[in-house]
Image (spheres, grey):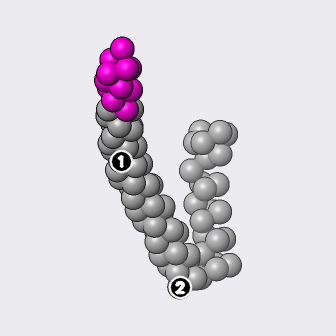
Amino acid sequence: MGLGGISIWQLIIVLVIVLLLFGTKKLKGMGGDLGSAIKGFKKAVKDDGQQSESDAKSDTEQLEEEDEAFSKAERSEEAEEQDKS
């Protein structure tokens, strides 16, 4: 028994039929196209992961800058209130 009730002989027969229908050149081309697609997908996932990391860093820096600006504004308001008193 092979995969899900399919024996190894049945798989070999299917492979032979596929080879006869499509030929080796066409199968080689399809394999190359599939390999290129997988390679492109992996590259896109890797690039997206790097971009997400850089976006997270820039978001963190932006939040820190906004927090610093807010703190400065609060301090200046407190100083103005103390000057008024």
Q: Is residue 83 magenta?
A: yes
Side of 30 relative to 68 (left or right): right
Nearer mark to the viewer, of 1 and 2? 1
What's under tag 1, amino acid-wise?
Answer: Ser
Quarter-of-image position of residue 72: top left
What's under tag 2, amino acid-wise?
Answer: Lys
Work out whether residue 20 or residue 65 is closer to the camera in this orientation and state it.
65
The location of residue 61, given as percent across then percent down, is 32, 42
Residue, disc 1: 58
**Label 2, residues with CA under 10 Å away: few <14, some 14-19, many ≥20:** few
Quarter-of-image position of residue 78: top left
Q: Are marks 1 and 2 in contact (CB under 8 Å)?
A: no
Establish if 32 lies above or below 2.
Answer: below
Question: SS class of the residue under badge 2?
Answer: helix
The residue range painted magenta reads 73-85
Q: Residue at x 36, y 25 (%)?
A: 80
Residue, disc 2: 25
Q: Quadrant of the C terminus?
A: top left
Q: Residue at x 46, y 71 (%)?
A: 36
Q: Is residue 6 visible?
A: yes
Q: Is residue 28 magenta?
A: no
Work out whether residue 11 or residue 52 is closer to the camera in this orientation and state it.
52
Q: Which mark is residue 13?
A: none
